[in-house]
Image (cartoon, rainbow, N blue to C red):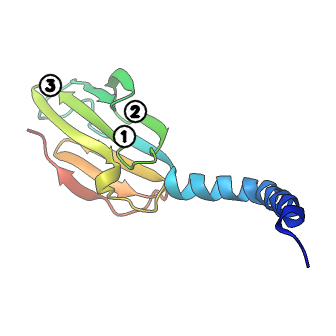
Amino acid sequence: MCSTKSTSPFLMFSLIVIFCTLSPYLQTTVAVSFNPRKVVRINNTIPTHNSIQPSKPLFAHCFSSSDNLGNWTMAENDQREIHFRVDWTWSTLFYCDFYWGSRYRGLPVFDASHDLCIGERYVSWKVKTDGFYLKCGESSDGYLRHLYTWN
C-alpha cells in the first residue's frame, strides 16, 4: 500500500511538469479568446474639392477611457489606425468626434460590448460626404454598411 505522504510530492511534481509543459499553449489560447488584438481603421474619402463644403479638412479626436489619441487633421484618402487589445472584461470602447466644416458626428468606432464585427480583427470606417460606413474584416472588397449620417 502506498501512503499519502509518499505520493503527495510525486503528485505535486507531476502537476508542475504538466503545467509548465502546457503553459505556452494556455497563454496563447487565453490571449486569443479573452484578450484579442483589434485594429480600427479610419479612412477619409471626402473629396478635398466638393460642392458641399470646398477645401474643408476632416478633423478627428479619438479616445478611450485609458487612451487619448489626440487631434488628427485628415486630408482626402488619409487613413489612421488604432491598435489595441480588448480588455478581459470586454468593456473596451473607442469613441471619435469628427468635424468637417460645420458638420459634426460623435460615434463609437469600437465597442466591445456591442461588437459589430465579431470574430474579425479589423474594423474599418470610411468617412464620406453623406456619413460613416462600416466594413468588417481585412478584405478591401468587403460590404460597407452605412451606419451614421452627419448631425
First along the sequence among labels 3 and 2: 2
Q: Which is nearer the eye, 10 or 133? A: 10
Tell me the number on the disc at residue 101.
3
Q: Is residue 110 left or right of residue 14?
A: left
Q: Are marks 1 and 3 in contact (CB under 8 Å)?
A: no
Q: Quadrant of the C terminus?
A: top left
Tell me residue 150's x, y (percent).
12, 40
The image shows residue 9, relative to residue 83, as above or below, that is below
- Residue 84: x, y in percent? 48, 39
Foreground residue among 26 and 131? 26
Q: Amino acid at mark 3?
A: Gly
- Picture residue at 49% right of the left edge, 38% below the top: 83
Residue at 26% from the left image edge and 42% from the top image edge: 108
Residue at mark 2: 78
Q: Rounded to the nearest whole Å, what is the CA distance between mark 1 and mark 3? A: 17 Å
Pinpoint residue 24: horizontal percent, then vertical percent. 74, 53
* Secondary structure of residue under mark 3: loop
Specify the amino acid type for callout 1.
Asn
Q: Secondary structure at mark 1?
A: strand
Label 2's element? Answer: loop
Disc 1 target residue: 43
Name the amino acid type tagged 2: Asp
**Which quadrant would the N terminus be assigned to in this image?**
bottom right
Mark 1 neighbour class, 10 Å CA radius: few under 14, some 14 to 19, many 20 or more: many
Distance in Å between CA atoms under marks 2 and 1: 6 Å
> Circles 2 and 1: CB distance less than 8 Å?
yes
Q: Mark 3 and mark 2: span between their CA atoms?
A: 17 Å
